[in-house]
């Protein structure tokens, strides 16, 4: 093998399309022997597609993958494993009720005459675990150990397969600080042994503490490959989000004119509000007629904060005050009663009732608030549905069409309609423009502004900084599930938000 | 063209009725041609008699069960305990009616309250302890017959009280009383689900429980209610079953009827994955199953082998209802040169 470089994995011009989306466009990606390589990018950048093509979950449309100089073309995760590529996913993909030893040797159990040699299997499992510095009883079921240990077991399994390349997909999202440190110790040991490690994570701190090099993807294209030590955080964030630094300095001043209005009446106030291991205690306030943005990378705690406010999850510390009155919500139902509304990020799972009609989806929250007995008549329901279909320009064959048949943007409008019917005091929008076309995006942004002008308080969560800068009077920036800063008025620029996300106080 | 015109009406409630009604019609047509006397109805001593009346009469128990079952299945659950709850309700009624000076109203009320408590037990296991419905209701399905045995002290308790006997054998407006009872319950169920928002909430919870909770629906309350209601329906069916034979048989009352009820609901067009439910469909489904049973009986198919043709007929109906199967069928025909 012509081994002039130290490249372990070489991906060249890899392309992959799904119906309607180019998930990967001629992406190059190189991992050297004995390095930890961070694969970075926002949601939809193509990270997971890249990994799935690499591990044989998806096929590819074009390009080559060479491991150790040999071209490979895995058609299934099993083939990829055999070639030397092992993946450890965020949610440990082992079998919880089998023993640790069985999990490590699954599919490759040592046998004699078709019978499993339990002794040899335990021995092999212990040897694999020793490489990740783990001494546990291998006969116990996997589920009896913590997630951190399970993660290490998954890595041990990868080692037992004699993997050359280890891919860790969000390995730290369910670990605490100490466990992360333990995991990193193991990763460094593997790196020292010459293994290539690819890590996908959204924790910036961790990228800088563990990785040697970084590859950034955006919208399915390669942005670049960088030495971690030579890439300032600020630049990394701007590369992920896709704004040139210089361009970011220019802020649309005219859009900010609505900023300096007269003092607004305070609606919601959070004081040291949070939940341990979920969102660190934070302060925040929203006034009537104000759009407050929640910015931060994916996983920074934006959705988590919204869920705490809406009563989906329960805050453990601090307090929430609504018009100076202390409130505590045990369920969304209670939050709705106080005039809160929430369109979740995951429309399909948490938003729409897919097989019910547009009409039923629109009147659902109102009817739920009214209770079983104060039933809206069929005519009232149709009137409400038709009013909002017209108001929001929902394109549907009529109020009786099942929502599942609508496009993403129209589903989002149906969800908005469901809440606007209620005339909420506080509207929480979690990624309201994700996955919908540009036209619908603009309409939704316009709608938000007109609601604000009517005095509604809006909490706006978006990954698109442009939208946040354009629409918000105040921005709370989150990083690693804690509040990293707050910007108001003229301070709100994409640059300032990115600096805060990256962990530098703005102005430096 | 015709296909396009059909599209918008696909959501109309009667659209789902097409297949079960077609199946029932086919079965009736078969009997019209091959089973003499099947459609003969007689007016004797002020009452209606005939095979069709018998079908309605005997089918009323499954109809009653399928009303509650339809709501449970709409929430993506299932209630396996209804047969056992029938036995419990029948046992309570038979034991109490034999005590001197117990008014009929109190006996019926007591039996129904016990049945509702059984439903609440199921509802509690499903909502509070989050046990999967099939497991949660399996507990009472198995234990319920034991409880009924305890109530009857291991005996088959017979009774002669004319009031209680009327429930299963009496006539009202020339029709056997169980038919009136089943129709009444159908009316009540339609009323509480379609004339209030309850039906919307049930379908919404069954289709997407998380999104329903996010919209302010108390999904647990809704689920609890459907099990309670299923218990009530089973209680009424239990009274009919005991009254029919004038005794409480803890071992055999309502045996396997939970399966007939589930079948009736599924044949009626309600999906086991939850969401939309069709009460009229469930009733047609129950009648289909009863007609099938009666047809077997009238054509002298031995009771031991009757389940086989019954199963075949049900498979045919289920296949006809499956959009995937229909698509495959049409594409096969289209594939062939005409």
Image: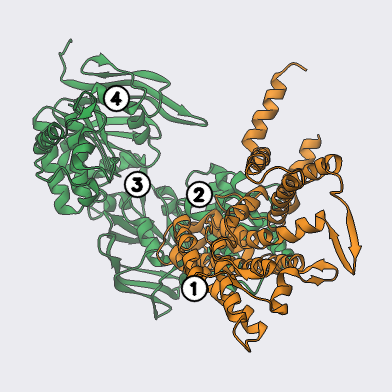
> Label 4 crowding class (10 Å Cα cut-off): few <14, some 14-19, many 20+?
many
Numbered disc 2: what chain? A
The hue used for chain B is: orange
Alpha carbon separation for disc pair 2 and 1: 53 Å
Alpha carbon separation for disc pair 3 and 2: 37 Å
Q: Is residue A316 above or below residue B265?
A: below
> Label 3 crowding class (10 Å Cα cut-off): few <14, some 14-19, many 20+?
few
Residue that numbered label 3 is attached to: A249
Instruction: Judge by depth and name the residue closer to the eye, B333 or A121.
Output: A121
Residue that numbered label 2 is attached to: A348
Displayed quadrant of residue A100? top left
- Mark 2 and mark 4 residues within 8 Å of each other at the beta carbon: no
Residue that numbered label 4 is attached to: A80
Mark 2 or 4, which is nearer the eye? 4
Residue that numbered label 1 is attached to: B153
> Label 2 crowding class (10 Å Cα cut-off): few <14, some 14-19, many 20+?
some
Residue A463 image point, x, y percent: 40, 48
Q: Mark 2 or 4 closer to N-term? A: 4
- Quadrant in the picture for the N terminus of chain A: top left
Displayed quadrant of residue A42? top left
């Amino acid at each position: 093998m012509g081994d002039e470089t130290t490249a372990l994995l070489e991906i060249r011009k890899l392309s992959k399309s799904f119906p309607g989306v180019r998930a990967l466009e001629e992406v190059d990606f190189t991992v050297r022997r004995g390095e930890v390589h961070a694969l970075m990018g926002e949601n939809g950048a193509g990270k997971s597609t890249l990994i799935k093509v690499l591990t044989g979950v998806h096929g590819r449309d074009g390009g080559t993958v060479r491991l150790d100089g040999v071209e490979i073309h895995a058609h299934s995760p099993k083939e990829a494993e055999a070639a030397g590529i092992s993946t450890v996913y965020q949610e440990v993909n082992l079998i919880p009720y089998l023993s640790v030893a069985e999990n490590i040797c699954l599919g490759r159990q040592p046998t004699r005459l078709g019978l499993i040699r339990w002794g040899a299997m335990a021995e092999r499992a212990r040897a694999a675990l020793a490489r990740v510095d783990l001494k546990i009883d291998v006969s116990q079921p996997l589920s009896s150990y913590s997630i951190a240990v399970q993660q290490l077991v998954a890595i041990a399994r990868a080692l037992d397969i004699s993997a050359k390349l280890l891919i860790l997909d969000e390995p730290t999202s369910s670990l605490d600080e100490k466990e992360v440190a333990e995991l990193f110790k193991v990763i460094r040991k593997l790196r020292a042994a010459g293994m290539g490690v690819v890590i996908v994570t959204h924790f910036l701190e961790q990228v800088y503490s563990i990785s040697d090099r970084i590859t950034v993807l955006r919208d399915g294209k390669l942005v670049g490959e960088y030495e971690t030590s030579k890439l300032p955080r600020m630049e990394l964030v701007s590369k992920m989000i896709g704004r040139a630094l210089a361009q970011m300095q220019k802020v649309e001043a005219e859009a900010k004119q609505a900023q300096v209005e007269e003092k607004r009446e305070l609606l919601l106030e959070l004081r040291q509000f949070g939940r341990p291991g979920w969102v660190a205690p934070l302060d925040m306030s929203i006034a009537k007629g104000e759009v407050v943005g929640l910015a931060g990378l994916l996983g920074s705690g934006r959705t988590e904060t919204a869920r705490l406010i809406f009563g989906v999850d329960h805050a453990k510390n601090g307090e929430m005050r609504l018009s100076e009155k202390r409130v505590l919500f045990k369920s969304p139902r209670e939050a709705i009663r106080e005039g809160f509304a929430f369109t979740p990020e995951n429309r399909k799972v948490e938003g729409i009732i897919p097989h019910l009609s547009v009409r039923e989806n629109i009147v659902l929250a109102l009817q739920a608030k009214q209770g079983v007995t104060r039933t809206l008549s069929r005519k009232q329901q149709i009137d409400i549905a038709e009013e909002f279909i017209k108001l929001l320009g929902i394109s549907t064959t009529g109020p009786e069409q099942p929502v599942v048949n609508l496009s993403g943007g129209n589903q989002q409008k149906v969800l908005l309609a469901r809440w606007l019917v209620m005339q909420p005091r506080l509207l929480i929008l979690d990624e309201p423009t994700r996955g919908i076309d540009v036209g619908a995006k603009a309409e939704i942004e316009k709608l938000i502004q007109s609601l604000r002008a009517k005095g509604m308080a809006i909490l706006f969560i978006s990954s698109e900084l442009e939208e946040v800068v354009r629409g918000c009077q105040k921005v709370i920036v989150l990083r690693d599930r804690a509040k990293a800063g707050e910007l108001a008025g003229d301070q709100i620029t994409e640059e300032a938000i990115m600096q805060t996300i990256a962990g530098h106080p703005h102005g430096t | 063209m015709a296909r396009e015109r059909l599209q918008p009406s696909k959501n109309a409630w009667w659209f789902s009725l097409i297949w079960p009604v077609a199946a029932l019609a086919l079965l009736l047509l078969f009997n019209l041609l091959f089973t003499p006397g099947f459609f003969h109805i007689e007016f004797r001593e002020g009452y209606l008699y005939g095979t069709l009346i018998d079908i309605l009469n005997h089918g009323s128990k499954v109809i009653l069960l399928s009303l509650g079952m339809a709501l449970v299945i709409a929430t993506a659950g299932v209630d396996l305990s209804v047969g056992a709850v029938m036995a419990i309700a029948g046992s309570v009624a038979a034991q109490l009616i034999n005590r001197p000076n117990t008014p009929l109203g109190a006996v019926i009320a007591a039996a129904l309250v016990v049945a509702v408590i059984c439903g609440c037990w199921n509802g509690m296991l499903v909502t509070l302890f989050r046990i999967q419905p099939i497991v949660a209701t399996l507990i009472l399905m198995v234990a319920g017959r034991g409880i009924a045995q305890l109530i009857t002290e291991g005996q088959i308790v017979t009774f002669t009280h004319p009031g209680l006997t009327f429930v299963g054998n009496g006539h009202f407006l020339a029709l056997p009383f169980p038919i009136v009872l089943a129709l009444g319950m159908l009316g009540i169920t339609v009323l509480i689900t379609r004339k209030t928002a309850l039906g919307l909430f049930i379908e919404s919870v069954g289709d997407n429980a998380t999104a329903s909770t996010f919209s302010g629906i108390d999904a647990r309350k809704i689920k609890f209610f459907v099990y309670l209601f299923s218990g009530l329906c089973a209680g009424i069916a239990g009274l009919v079953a005991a009254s029919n034979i004038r005794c409480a048989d803890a071992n055999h009352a309502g045996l396997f009827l939970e399966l007939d009820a589930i079948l009736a609901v599924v044949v009626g067009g309600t999906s086991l994955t939850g969401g939309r439910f069709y009460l009229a469909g469930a009733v047609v489904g129950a009648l289909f199953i009863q007609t099938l049973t009666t047809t077997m009986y009238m054509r002298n198919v031995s009771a031991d082998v009757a389940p086989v043709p019954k199963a075949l007929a049900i498979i045919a109906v289920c296949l006809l209802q499956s959009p995937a199967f229909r698509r495959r069928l049409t594409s096969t025909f289209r594939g062939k040169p005409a």
